[in-house]
Image (cartoon, helix red, strand yellow):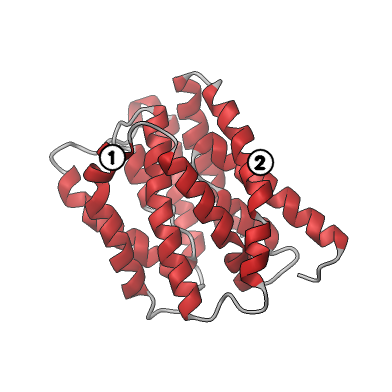
Amino acid sequence: MSGEPLDILLVFLVFLLAGTVKGVTGMGLPTVGVGLLVLVMTPGEAAALIVVPSLATNLWQAFAGPSLHPLARRLWPMLAAICAGTAAGAALPLGVPGASAALGAVLAVYGGLGLAPKLRPAVPPRAEPALRPLVGLLTGAVTAVTGVFVVPAAPFLGALGLGRDALVQALGLSFSVSTLALGALLAARGGFGGGAGFASLLALLPAVLGMALGGRLRQAMPPERFRRVFFGGLVVLGAHLLLR
């Protein structure tokens, strides 16, 4: 990024929009943010810039609700496996050709199934304990290779039958762990040089403002409308990754 006023304004607006999307759906800040930031910077710079706003908003999302401890007890095998999967995937280079497009196709199909009431995906209770660590390992490996930590964590959590606010809180918990793991991986690869860490800190303000706005919009939604927005958001994010 050149530091010109128009570029700075664009970054502010990008994080405001990405934060609003996250406030409504519980996800999308890195996907929307990186997808638009690459208009004015390299993908590596965009990934470094997204870390602090993503971590802060994910932690806020994880702690903003009454279900943190029950969710942490329920999901800890997945969360631990995310860290292990990210560490294992560190041997592969970030940005494997075609990986983001494949993830986008999976997200779009899953979101489409969720929008069809008769085809709504669900995880059987008996299968959930075995799936938690597997989903975590896959999410961590995908994070290390693509920088995107939505798949398969978000579809899995969306299929657990959680309520609106519990789902958003579970996503925040999962994404917080993924962001910490990704930040450690980027730091190990030297991705925070040249003032990227300070710039990422400055980007926190518009992201928080956007998330507060999105949270108000979410609270005003009936549960069924939120369900449509959530799965519709998966379709849009998937299409974005596929086309990008």
Q: Position of residue 215 (x, y in %)?
A: 56, 32
Instruction: Name the residue beneath numbered marker 1.
Output: 69
Q: Quadrant of the N terminus?
A: bottom right
Q: Position of residue 52 (x, y in %)?
A: 56, 59
Are there few (<14), some (14-19), or many (20+) residues within 10 Å of tag 1? few
Q: Quadrant of the C terminus?
A: bottom right
Of the image marks 2 and 1, the number of the one nearer the N terminus: 1
Residue sitting nearer the eye, 133 or 107: 133
Residue type at numbered disc 1: His
Determine whether, in the image, residue 227 is placed left or right of residue 240: left
Determine whether, in the image, residue 216 is placed left or right of residue 165: right
* Quadrant of res 123: top left
Vertical position of residue 231 compared to residue 90: above or below: above
How far apart are the two marked residues, 2 and 1, measured between alpha carbons? 26 Å
Determine whether, in the image, residue 125 is placed left or right of residue 225: left
Instruction: Name the residue beneath numbered marker 2.
Output: 209
Please tell me which residue is depicted at 81% across the width and 61% down the height of the picture: 7
- Does dot 2 land on a helix, a strand or a loop? helix
Q: Position of residue 47 (x, y in %)?
A: 58, 66
The label on residue 56 is none
Can residue 238 be seen? no
